[in-house]
Image (cartoon, grey):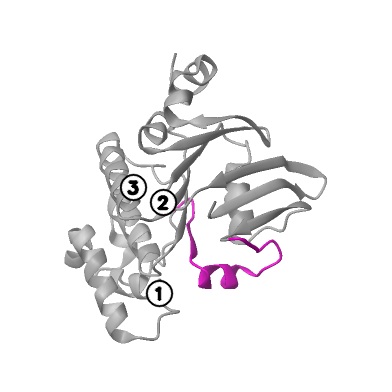
């Protein structure tokens, strides 16, 4: 396992948001977490990346206990998160947003190569490189958010609701990109309300309900599970 979450509890004040949550992600896997709004999916990612402190449990990454590490130390270890809503800097250009993703890299040639790799995946970003991020369409903005994360050469990529707000055609394109990233060897933990699409690209998945993991299995097993079909796949 590259990532192990063990018996995780998270509270916001008296509100018990995550309750004894355990999951694992193997190197090279794409693992999805599906569930309704308010299930605790975003809190799970924010805890893994260090923005929220758990009240119990452990987070093990590459065999090391990172439960008490600061977020920036986790970034240095290769953990990157694309937040819900993309988190772009609207008054910076596309290029400036991308370069922020490589702020830990001191080798200019390495940064240039990463930039070319990102432009190879997202040619539209090359065309828009001098535009302000706020002028991008929703789909282009999501491409920029993914591209910025790739500039940091992540080993583990956490994605929070990447399809939110996108038109159906763009959702299809987005999931092709996510599949490609997995094929290129990036380990991905994907939180997504579009359960059908998530289970199409995932190797394995977990179902989170009111802070509990209630189901887990291969993506195929969950696609065929009658409870999942009824609750998340439309019958």
Question: In the depicted view, which residue is nearer to us: 223 or 93?
Answer: 223
The spot of residue 10 in percent (x, y) is 73, 48
Q: Residue at x 33, y 47 (%)?
A: 178
Q: Is residue 75 magenta?
A: yes
User: Could you say which quadrant of the image residue 149 lies in?
Assistant: bottom left
The spot of residue 127 in percent (x, y) is 16, 65
Question: In the depicted view, which residue is nearer to us: 25 or 39?
Answer: 25
In the rendered structure, the answer to whether residue 118 lies left or right of residue 37 reads: left
Check disc 2 and report the residue beneath it.
28
* Mark 3 vs mark 1: in front: 3
The circle drawn on residue 100 is 1
Q: Mark 3–mark 1 contact, CB under 8 Å?
A: no
Q: Residue at x 67, y 58 (%)?
A: 52
Question: In the depicted view, which residue is nearer to us: 148 or 68?
Answer: 68
* Mark 1 vs mark 2: in front: 2
Give neighbour class at mark 1: few <14, some 14-19, many 20+ (Cα, 10 Å): some
Give neighbour class at mark 3: few <14, some 14-19, many 20+ (Cα, 10 Å): many
Q: Mark 2–mark 3 contact, CB under 8 Å?
A: no
Check disc 3 and report the residue beneath it.
178
Q: CA distance from mark 3 to mark 1?
A: 21 Å
The spot of residue 198 in percent (x, y) is 41, 36
Please tell me which of labels 3 and 1 falls first in the chain: 1
Q: CA distance from mark 2 to mark 3?
A: 13 Å
In the rendered structure, the answer to whether residue 178 lies left or right of residue 194 reads: left
Query: Vertically, is 7 above or below 34?
Result: below
Camera sees residue 90: yes
| Tally of numbered tags | 3
Q: Is residue 72 magenta?
A: yes
Q: Residue at x 43, y 78 (%)?
A: 103
State the extent of the magenta-drawn residues as a range.
63-85
The circle drawn on residue 5 is none
């Amino acid at each position: 396992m590259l990532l192990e979450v063990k018996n995780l509890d998270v509270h916001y004040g008296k509100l018990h948001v995550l309750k004894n949550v355990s999951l694992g992600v193997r190197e090279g896997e794409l693992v999805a977490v599906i569930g309704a709004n308010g299930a605790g999916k975003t809190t799970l990612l924010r805890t893994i990346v260090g923005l929220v402190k758990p009240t119990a449990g452990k987070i093990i990454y590459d065999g090391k206990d990172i439960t008490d590490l600061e977020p920036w130390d986790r970034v240095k270890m290769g953990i990157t998160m694309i937040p819900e809503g993309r988190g772009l800097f609207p008054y910076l250009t596309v290029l400036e947003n991308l370069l922020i993703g490589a702020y830990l890299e001191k080798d200019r040639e390495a940064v240039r190569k990463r930039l070319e790799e990102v432009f190879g995946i997202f040619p539209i970003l090359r065309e828009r490189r001098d535009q302000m991020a706020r002028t991008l369409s929703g789909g282009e903005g999501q491409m920029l958010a993914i591209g910025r994360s790739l500039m940091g050469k992540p080993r583990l990529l956490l994605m929070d609701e990447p399809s939110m707000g996108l038109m159906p055609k763009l959702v299809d394109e987005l999931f092709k990109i996510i599949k490609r990233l997995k094929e290129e060897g990036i380990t991905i933990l994907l939180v997504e309300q579009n359960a059908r699409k998530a289970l199409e690209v995932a190797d394995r998945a977990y179902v989170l309900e009111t802070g509990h993991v209630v189901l887990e299995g291969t993506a195929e097993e969950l696609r065929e599970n009658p409870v999942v079909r009824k609750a998340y796949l439309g019958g």
